[in-house]
Image: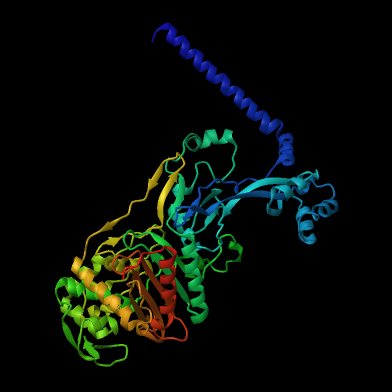
């Protein structure tokens, strides 16, 4: 190092020491010598810590014409507060504010007389006109502060899917707690949002967050169609009033892409009014987070397995004895009646447990388990919602004959409604397994747009197998279901009902008077645009799903065909 370099180094070092000395002296003067003076000024100017002032990206619904409408956005308004230490005459202030706000006198006086109070909220979410009027009164000790909050314009519409946000007291940060708000939290969060802090402090303590922004941040555009979602929730509400189930829910999906047009369950909630919630359990989404033994809607998959493996063909017959004893356990048809020698079609048309068990056992445990796994029944669906439940299919790992038999008609194994519609979409989609999803596009804050890819694998069934099962399910609707009353003149409809006994987890076995009803259908059957799944847990006053869910399905199918102006297919 030469003499000039040494001089520069010494000069810079001395400069740094001088700056450090000035800063130290300034800090000492501010905090020690003039501490009480500045504290008083701060109290007179203090506005609430703006932890509610945050910027969060939006979530949108998508109408059938591509129009987007806000599902979750940010609202803004004002908070009215008082600093008790600065109030001159509490009674005068109360009388003045009462002309603008609905105030309880006792509550106001309690806040106004707090000896150590600096910030007491009187009202939230006040509009700008009123806030400016109050500010214009010039009342000492009365403050007006801007605030922002999460708004869900649709109220309870798709509330389980959208989710809610929550604030961490420790970090004063806001994050998603359920639904899309949680699953896509990192994308919905805007860098630096969640609290209002001193920029000088932030420069030294959170340098990274000040000078960087998340390139992944953006708005979510969902596939939820608001009119379809509204209609689904209306149909579910009507069915709930009639049958009073413990739970009821439904999903409407494109079986070819996995895009979800609507999904809903009851009971539900309004994310704008969380104070009225009595139990946090209502925030959980049973369509994704709960598993159920689904009953006879599993039989089309059993039939597809037997046909595709070559265990039977469409012209095969079997001798239906009404009941079977396997591994010392007895299983029967729903009415315990024998049918004699009958064709494959009747297994679906009459929903015969013994028929499903017979063809499953003929398929063999190894192939039966392999096919059911290929339909996605052995794992999660991959839906972009949190807390998806794993299916309970342990009975198929080392199965006895009784395990294969009961699984063939939807007992002994449990899956989520989301997992079930995914598996049944294999038939509707031509043999492919899709990944259900709600978000179809992300509009990044840097103006880039990311389309969410459709994910599907397969085929896992031969084309001829799919065609045969579709024809069988169309026959179920045209001839058997509701004595053929659901048959539509210009559309082919494929559908199947399911009724399952509900397990008694306390005493073991199954309840004798509690049932899970399920229903699925897709249409037009040979080029399906929609697949619909419905379920009810413990409806009152009816044993079979055909009694409780046939009408809701027909209403939804008729609405969708008309709303989307689907071309006739017959």
Query: Does residue 426 show up?
Result: yes
Residue at the far top in the pictured view: 3
Give the vertical position of 434 relative to 552 (above or below). above
Q: Position of residue 450 (x, y in %)?
A: 38, 45
On screen, 354 above or below 266? below
Which colour scheme appears in the figure? rainbow
Is residue 511 left or right of 81 when viewed as pictured? left
| Residue plotted at (25% across, 91% down) | 322
Give the answer, above or below, for where 9 lies relative to 358: above
Image location of residue 386, percent across then percent down? 41, 59
Q: Give how far across and how far down residue 130 sits, in percent.
A: 74, 50
Question: In this orientation, which residue lies closer to the viewer: 468 or 217?
Answer: 468
State which quarter of the image contains the N terminus. top left
Residue drawn at x 21%, y 81% as measured from the top left: 344
Position of residue 163 measured from the top left corner of the image (x, y, whole percent): 49, 59
Q: Is residue 340 above or below residue 62?
A: below
Q: Residue 136 occupies which quadrant of the picture? A: top right
Looking at the rendered structure, the number of numbered marks drawn on it comes to 0
Left or right: 346 as drawn, with respect to 445: left
Residue 549 seen in the current view = no
Left or right: 557, with 346 as reference point: right
Return the residue nearer the eye: 330 or 523: 523
Q: Quadrant of the C terminus?
A: bottom left
529 or 203: nearer the eye?
A: 529
Q: Residue furthest left?
A: 310
């Amino acid at each position: 190092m030469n003499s000039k370099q040494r001089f520069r180094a010494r000069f810079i070092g001395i400069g740094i020491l001088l700056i450090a000395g000035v800063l130290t002296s300034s800090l000492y003067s501010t905090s020690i010598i003039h501490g009480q003076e500045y504290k008083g000024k701060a109290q007179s100017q203090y506005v609430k810590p703006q932890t509610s002032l945050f910027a969060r990206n939006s979530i949108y619904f998508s109408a059938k014409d591509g129009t987007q409408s806000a599902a979750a956005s940010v609202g803004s308004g004002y908070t009215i507060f008082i600093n008790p230490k600065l109030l001159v005459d509490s009674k005068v202030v109360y009388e003045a504010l009462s002309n603008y706000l609905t105030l309880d006198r006792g509550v106001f006086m309690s806040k106004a007389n707090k000896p150590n109070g600096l910030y007491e909220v009187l009202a939230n979410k006040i509009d700008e006109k009123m806030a400016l009027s109050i500010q214009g009164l010039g009342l000492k000790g009365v403050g007006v502060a801007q605030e922002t909050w999460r708004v869900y314009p649709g109220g309870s519409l798709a509330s389980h899917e959208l989710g809610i946000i929550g604030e961490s007291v420790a970090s004063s940060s806001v994050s998603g707690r359920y639904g899309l708000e949680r699953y896509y939290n990192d994308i919905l969060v805007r860098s630096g949002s969640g609290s209002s802090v001193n920029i000088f402090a932030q420069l030294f303590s959170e340098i990274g967050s000040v000078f960087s922004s998340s390139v992944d941040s953006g708005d979510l555009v969902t596939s939820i169609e608001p009119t379809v979602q509204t209609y689904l929730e209306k149909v579910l509400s009507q069915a709930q009033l009639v049958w009073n189930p413990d739970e009821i829910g439904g999903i409407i999906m494109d079986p070819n892409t996995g895009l979800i047009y609507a999904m809903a369950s009851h009971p539900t909630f309004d994310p704008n009014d969380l104070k009225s919630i009595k139990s946090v359990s209502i925030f959980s989404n049973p369509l994704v987070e709960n598993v159920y033994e689904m009953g006879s809607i599993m039989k089309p998959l059993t039939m597809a397995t037997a046909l595709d493996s070559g265990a039977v063909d469409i012209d095969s017959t079997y001798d239906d004895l009404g009941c079977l004893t396997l591994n010392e356990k007895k299983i029967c048809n729903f009415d315990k009646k024998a049918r004699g020698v009958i064709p494959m079609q009747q297994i679906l048309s009459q929903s015969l447990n013994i028929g499903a068990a017979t063809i499953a056992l003929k398929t063999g445990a190894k192939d039966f388990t392999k096919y059911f796994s290929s339909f996605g029944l052995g794992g999660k669906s991959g839906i972009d919602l949190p807390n998806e439940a794993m299916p309970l299919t342990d009975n198929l790992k080392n199965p006895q004959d009784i395990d294969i038999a009961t699984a063939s008609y939807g007992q002994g194994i449990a899956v989520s409604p989301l997992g079930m519609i995914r598996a049944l979409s294999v038939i509707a989609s031509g043999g492919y397994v899709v990944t259900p999803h709600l978000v179809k596009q992300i509009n990044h804050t840097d103006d880039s747009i990311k389309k969410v890819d459709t994910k599907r694998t397969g085929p896992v069934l031969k084309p001829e197998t799919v065609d045969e099962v579709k024809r069988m399910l169309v026959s179920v609707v045209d001839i058997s279901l509701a004595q053929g009353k659901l048959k539509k003149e210009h559309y082919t409809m494929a559908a199947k009902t399911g009724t399952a006994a509900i397990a008694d987890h306390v005493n073991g076995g199954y309840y004798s008077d509690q049932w899970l009803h399920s229903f699925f259908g897709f249409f037009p059957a040979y080029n399906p645009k929609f697949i619909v799944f419905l379920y009810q847990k413990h409806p009152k006053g009816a044993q079979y799903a055909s009694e409780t869910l046939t009408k809701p399905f027909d209403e939804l199918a008729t609405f969708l065909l008309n709303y989307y102006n689907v071309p006739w297919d017959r």
